Amino acid sequence: MLELAGRLYGTAMEQVEALDRRIEALRTEVRQALLAGDRERVTALRKQLRQAEREWDALVDDELEEAPLVPAPRPATGPLLPVREQVHQALTLLGAPAAPKLVVAVHEAFATGELTPTKLTSLRRDEERSFQSAPHSRPYYLCAALTADHLAPARGLIAVSSWPMATRIIGPLSLRVDFLTAAIRLAEHLDRLAETGPNARRLLWRFAATVPGAATSADAMTPASVADAARAELAIHADADRSHREAAAKRASTQLTVTQQLFGARLRGIAATGS
């Protein structure tokens, strides 16, 4: 059974590595097309790149579901934090908008107490109602990431209201940029810890496996190598992503109400002008 599982895992990792190579090749072609000013080719290549990244995400999600995080025994340290504070801690560590599954994975790797995706289902709606009833009465709210084109809530992402508006914007490159940002911050956090459990290393490998040059295997992975590789790729995308985000943030500050700036506009109301 273990031998069969190993073969299946090896096959999946070979597929992931093949997609890694294809993704890296497509990124190189996108940069070359940008330099050549070939807008049609850039559009076609980016479509292929997004499809390859979706395929990679699906493969990794399948692997994670078959090998779930192992709950580590935790000492009792007093009353548990409210769910919103647990989520806030995880997002603060990541430093970027994140999906509930990733928030839960970060919590399980580093924090105390149980946190499940179902507990996050209505959290953003509750936060919006709280803000509308008493605006700015809390030091932070768990809010929406906003799409750069329509300034609408980005599906399935949670952000923190105290972050700069540009950080909460999701443009064409932002998902990858945020992935790399989170990888760097997680790696740096692990590097500061005297001891790391299996959940934390498994979480870091989830990031390292898709960053070129980060590690050849989970066993050989080090936080420093993951952070360095993620920084190298981030440098490629950061300027273009920042430009998209800042332009959208500027529109949001003039077109949206205070509540909409945190929780997004309905699609009928805002056009992506001035971008």
Image (tube, helix red, strand yellow):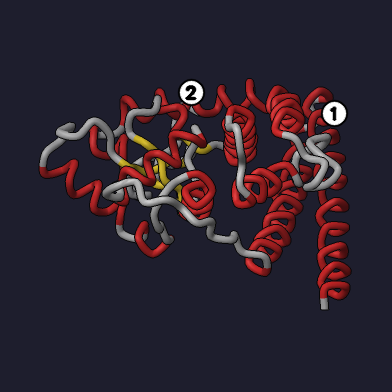
| Residue at image point 38% right, 46% down | 87
Describe the element under mark 1 as helix, strand or loop.
Answer: helix
What distance separates the C-alpha of mark 1 from that of mark 2? 25 Å
Q: Which residue is farthest front? A: 75
- Tell me residue 234's x, y (percent): 68, 27
How many other residues sit within 10 Å of disc 2, few (<14), some (14-19) or many (≥20)? some
| Residue at image point 47% right, 48% down | 107
In-image side of 201 versus 6 (left or right): left
Q: Using the image, tell me which numbered label, if any, was put on residue 32.
A: 1
Please name the amino acid that badge 1 sits on: Gln
Seen from the viewer's position, the closer of residues 30 and 68 is: 68
Please name the amino acid that badge 2 sits on: Glu
- Tell me residue 189's x, y (percent): 57, 31
Q: Is residue 166 above or below residue 260?
A: above
Does residue 232 appear in the picture of this structure? Answer: yes
Seen from the viewer's position, the closer of residues 211 and 205 is: 205
- Tell me residue 182's x, y (percent): 58, 36
| Residue at image point 72% right, 50% down | 53
- Tell me residue 188's x, y (percent): 61, 28
In-image side of 132 versus 83 (left or right): left
Describe the element under mark 2 as helix, strand or loop.
Answer: helix
In-image side of 25 versus 101 (left or right): right
In-image side of 264 versus 41 (left or right): left
Seen from the viewer's position, the closer of residues 61 and 34 is: 61
Residue where numbered disc 2 is placed = 246
